[in-house]
Image (tube, rainbow, N blue to C red):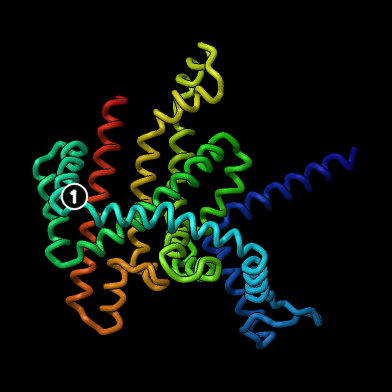
C-alpha cells in the first residue's frame, strides 16, 4: 500500500522533468553545446582535430583510396571507356556538330523564329530570339556557338537516356528513391570542377569528358522532376485506367507519362540550363566552343573578348529557355 504512492510520485516527477527539459528553447541547447566545446578545448589545450585517439589513428586516407580505385578502373576497364568515347564522339558529337555548322545562317534564324513563334505565340518574343541569335553571328562566334550547341545537345540527349528511366524507377520504388536521393544531393552539391578529374582520367582530353562531366552535373534535376511529376499524377486517373483493365506498362505510357510531361519538360529545361553553365568549365579539358573564348579572355586578360563570349552564352541560354518553357506551357494548357 505504501510503495504504490511512492512509485506514482517518482513517475510523475520524471514526467515533469522531461517536460521541463523539452520546454527549454533550442537556442539554449546550442549555447550550452558551444560552451561545452569551449570548456573541453581549454582543458585539453588542443583546437585541431586529433590525429590519434588512444593510439588509434583517426585519419581516413580517402584520397589514397580514390586514387587507387581510379587507377584500377582505368587499367581494368580501358576498353569500355574507349568504346564509350568512340560512340559519343562518332555517333553523336561529330554528326551533330557537322549538321549544325552545315546549316546556313539564314535557315537557322528561320528555324529559331518558327520554334519561337510556335512555343510562345508572341511576335515580340520571337523577334527577340531571332535578334539574339543574329547577335551571336555579328560577334563572329557563329561556328563556336554551333560547337557549343552540339555539346549541349549531346549532353541533354544522353541525360534523357539516363535520367528518364531512373526518374520513372524512383517514382515506382520507394526503396530505390531513398537510395537515389542522397546520390543526387551529392551530385548537385559537389563542385563542378571535381567532375572533370575522373572524366579526364577515364576519357582523356577533348569534348567527350566535357560531355560526361556535363551529364553528371546536369542530370539530377531531370531525375527529380520526372519522379515528382509521376508521383503527382492523380490516383483517380490511375484507378480509372486500372478499372478498364490497363496493364502497368499501359498506365505508365498512356496515363502517368502524359500527365507528368509538364514536370518532365521543366526538368529538361533545367538540365539544359545547367549544361550551359558547364560550358566554360568544360573548356578546361578541351571542349572548345564559346567556353574556350571565355577561358582565353581570362588568361589574357581581355575584358571585351570575355564580355562578347559571355553575352553569346547568355543569348543561347535565353533562346533555349524560352523555347522549351513555351512548349511546356502550351502542353500544360492543352491538358487543362
Image-based side of 307 in relation to 273, left or right: left
Residue at image position (39%, 39%) is: 264
Residue at image position (63%, 41%) is: 175
Question: What is the quadrant of the C terminus in the image?
Answer: top left
- Answer whether residue 23 is visible to the viewer in this image: yes
Q: Position of residue 219 (x, y in %)?
A: 45, 51
Height in image: 215 above or below 123? below
Which quadrant of the view contains residue 268? top left
Q: How many marks?
A: 1
Q: What residue sits right under mark 1 in the picture?
A: 108
Q: Position of residue 135 (x, y in %)?
A: 13, 60
Q: Position of residue 243 (x, y in %)?
A: 52, 12
Image-based side of 118 in relation to 51, left or right: left
Q: Nearer the viewer, residue 214 or 142?
A: 142
Q: Position of residue 110 (x, y in %)?
A: 14, 45
- Answer whether residue 274 is visible to the viewer in this image: no
Which quadrant of the view contains residue 176? top right
Residue sitting at the far bottom:
45
Q: Nearer the viewer, residue 14 or 263?
A: 263
Q: Nearer the viewer, residue 195 or 109?
A: 109
Residue at image position (31%, 68%) is: 291
Amino acid at each position: 500500500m505504501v510503495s504504490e504512492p511512492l512509485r506514482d510520485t517518482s513517475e510523475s516527477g520524471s514526467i515533469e522533468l522531461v517536460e521541463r527539459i523539452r520546454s527549454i528553447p533550442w537556442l539554449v541547447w546550442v549555447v550550452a553545446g558551444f560552451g561545452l566545446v569551449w570548456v573541453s578545448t581549454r582543458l585539453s589545450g588542443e583546437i585541431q582535430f586529433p590525429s590519434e585517439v588512444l593510439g588509434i589513428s583517426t585519419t581516413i586516407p580517402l584520397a589514397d583510396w580514390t586514387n587507387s580505385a581510379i587507377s584500377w578502373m582505368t587499367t581494368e576497364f580501358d576498353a569500355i571507356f574507349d568504346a564509350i568515347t568512340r560512340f559519343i564522339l562518332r555517333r553523336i558529337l561529330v554528326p551533330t556538330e557537322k549538321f549544325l555548322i552545315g546549316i546556313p545562317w539564314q535557315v537557322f534564324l528561320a528555324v529559331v523564329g518558327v520554334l519561337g513563334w510556335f512555343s510562345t505565340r508572341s511576335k515580340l518574343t520571337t523577334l527577340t530570339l531571332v535578334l539574339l541569335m543574329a547577335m551571336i553571328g555579328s560577334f563572329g562566334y557563329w561556328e563556336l556557338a554551333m560547337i557549343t550547341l552540339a555539346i549541349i545537345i549531346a549532353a541533354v540527349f544522353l541525360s534523357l537516356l539516363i535520367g528518364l528511366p531512373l526518374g520513372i524507377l524512383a517514382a515506382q520504388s520507394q526503396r530505390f528513391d531513398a537510395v537515389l536521393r542522397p546520390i543526387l544531393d551529392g551530385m548537385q552539391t559537389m563542385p563542378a570542377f571535381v567532375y572533370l578529374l575522373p572524366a579526364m582520367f577515364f576519357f582523356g582530353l577533348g569534348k567527350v569528358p566535357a560531355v560526361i562531366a556535363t551529364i553528371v552535373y546536369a542530370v539530377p534535376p531531370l531525375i527529380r522532376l520526372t519522379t515528382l511529376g509521376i508521383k503527382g499524377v492523380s490516383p483517380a486517373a490511375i484507378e480509372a485506367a486500372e478499372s478498364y483493365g490497363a496493364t502497368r506498362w499501359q498506365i505508365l505510357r498512356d496515363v502517368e507519362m502524359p500527365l507528368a510531361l509538364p514536370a518532365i519538360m521543366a526538368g529538361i529545361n533545367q538540365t539544359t540550363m545547367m549544361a550551359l553553365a558547364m560550358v566554360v568549365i568544360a573548356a578546361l579539358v578541351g571542349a572548345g566552343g564559346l567556353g574556350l573564348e571565355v577561358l582565353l579572355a581570362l588568361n589574357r586578360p581581355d575584358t571585351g573578348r570575355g564580355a562578347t563570349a559571355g553575352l553569346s552564352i547568355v543569348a543561347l541560354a535565353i533562346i533555349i529557355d524560352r523555347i522549351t518553357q513555351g512548349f511546356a506551357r502550351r502542353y500544360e494548357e492543352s491538358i487543362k
